Image: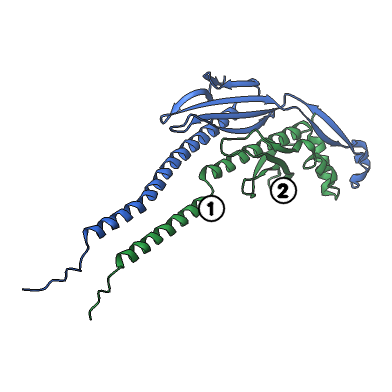
Chain colours: A blue, B green
Amino acid sequence: MKYTNKKTGLTLTEVMLAMALLASAFIPIVGVMGTSIKATDKDDRTIKAVNLCQEKLNRALQFPFESIAVGTHGGATAKTLKTSGSAGAITLVLGPEKIDGIDFTSQLVISDVPGTFRVPTYDPFAKGENPNQPNNWGWATRNIAYSNLYHKYVMTVTWKDKGSAAVKFYTLASHKAKIRR
Amino acid sequence: MKTDNRKGMALILALVFAVVLLQMAIAYSSMTRASKPQTIQIDERVKLDYLAHGLTELALLKFQLYPADFYACWEAAKKGVPVHLRTYTINAPEFTITGFADSKSSFNSVPINIQLASMAILTNNKWNTEALFIQAGAAYTDQFGRDISKEAVRLVSLQRMLKK
């Protein structure tokens, strides 16, 4: 008969203790994973909102100047804007819409940005007399006020994160001038 | 006398394992804090680009309304007097917008400064063509104190005509 060393191997208590240790170590890891999944979903919604806002503002800026009236468009009320031209007509849909199961609301606010141009002007006769001496061209600075020539476009997209009641928003702004294209 | 050297090994292993896990958690946490969220990076690129482009529109409008004055300023600058060109372009108050606050969002709402960087005429003597070069920049300081900026460039083909 062989003698066996009863001290070798692991007792049930040791195994249970080791498992408890491992389990307790995994709790925060699982917690971190859960937080990461939530953060990814949040980022996904934000990126979708940024892209949507960008796409809509791009479309709005393609419309001819003054073809979209100054004021608020979309928001809680759905609104579709279309260019009148037959070839290559542009359509801009504003208001509530569902994209990939997420509810987004878009709103465009156009406002006039009046201002003053500072224009240095010269005297053509003085320039003709002294073509190589720019200091003697009879310079004067004019301040010329303008309005209804430069509009501000503010596009806002709102949405909600999963399991949250708080409304998130993303706004992009740009300007468009009445220039000959 | 024979002793069992493995006594207490489980405790040491468990402690080593716990230390490794703790280090991993600290590393992950510091990485998360150090890296800038992807949404913020996209947001910076997009909003600054739109604003800089918006200012090039105003510069082009001014040029279309007062081209003769721009050409005179440009000619004077070429002949060594750049002050009038600066007055027309970068020093004109309409081309400096400070603290623009309309481009905001739930996660990043900092005021943006927009400034015209330059307006110039590019000439190609071989093909006898001209183009107007407009450059504008938009910038802000983020919540970590870093300066974020973006520039927009616009090139417009020019054709000089004598109007009667």
State the image coordinates of residue A151 (x, y, percent, origin top left): 68, 27
In which quadrant of the rendered image does the N terminus of chain B lie? bottom left
Q: Label 1: which residue?
A: B34
Tell me if A67 is positioned left or right of A168 in this view.
right
State the image coordinates of residue B115 (x, y, percent, origin top left): 72, 41
Question: Which of pointers 2 and 1 indicates the residue nearer the eye?
Answer: 1
State the image coordinates of residue B39 (x, y, percent, origin top left): 52, 42
Q: Chain of mark 2?
A: B
In which quadrant of the rendered image does the C terminus of chain B lie? top right
Closer to us: A29 or B100: A29
* Residue A96 seen in render: yes
Closer to us: A50 or B90: A50
* Disc 2 element: loop
Q: Residue at x 63, y 29 (%)?
A: A153
Q: Label 2: which residue?
A: B125
Tell me if A66 is positioned left or right of A141 in this view.
left
The amino acid type of the residue labelled 1 equals Ala
Whichever of callouts 2 and 1 sits on the residue coming sooner in the sequence is 1
Q: Are marks 2 and 1 in contact (CB under 8 Å)?
A: no
